[in-house]
Image (cartoon, rainbow, N blue to C red):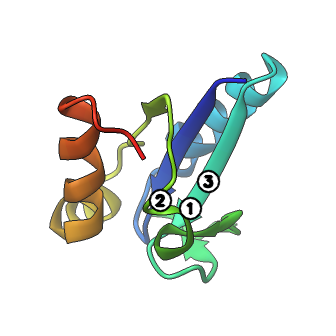
Amino acid sequence: MVRVLVPIADGIEEIEAETIIDVLRRAGVEVVCVGLTGKPVTSSRKVKIIPDTSLEAVKDEAFDMIVLPGGGDGVDKLKKDPRVDVILRRMNQGKNG
């Protein structure tokens, strides 16, 4: 089964995160939504999103794709997290998981 990682952070646009998660899950894709801390994430419009797990818990697992939802502050937090950078670089080099 295809596995997709969707990291989210405070300030994310909830529609961008929730829509992709919903569409992929409806298609039978295994989606793992992760927060940077594992705690509920507060979107830009103050909607609470509860991630499946933390990024720390899955950072060494294999994924077929990574989807980075948009949203000003959330995107900035994802960009600044070194674990996200490592995962993206590993995927780009074909060294996934």
Q: Tell me which label, 3 or 2, sits earlier in the chain.
A: 2
Please name the amino acid that badge 2 sits on: Ile
Residue situated in front as seen by the camera: 13 or 27: 27
Assess whether mark 1 and mark 2 are in contact (beta carbons under 8 angstroms). Answer: yes
Compare residues 51 and 97 and report the one nearer the observer.
Answer: 97
Q: Secondary structure at mark 3?
A: strand
As drawn, 70 above or below 78: above
Report if residue 72 is visible in the image: no
Locate residue 59, reporting x and y percent: 44, 62
Residue drawn 28% across and 66% down?
Answer: 83
Query: Is residue 36 left or right of 30 when viewed as pictured?
Result: left
The residue drawn where x is 49% and y is 82% is 37
At mark 2, the secondary structure is strand
Is residue 15 left or right of 48 when viewed as pictured? left
**Residue marked by disc 1:** 34
Residue under label 2 = 8
Picture residue at 42% right of the left edge, 42% below the top: 69
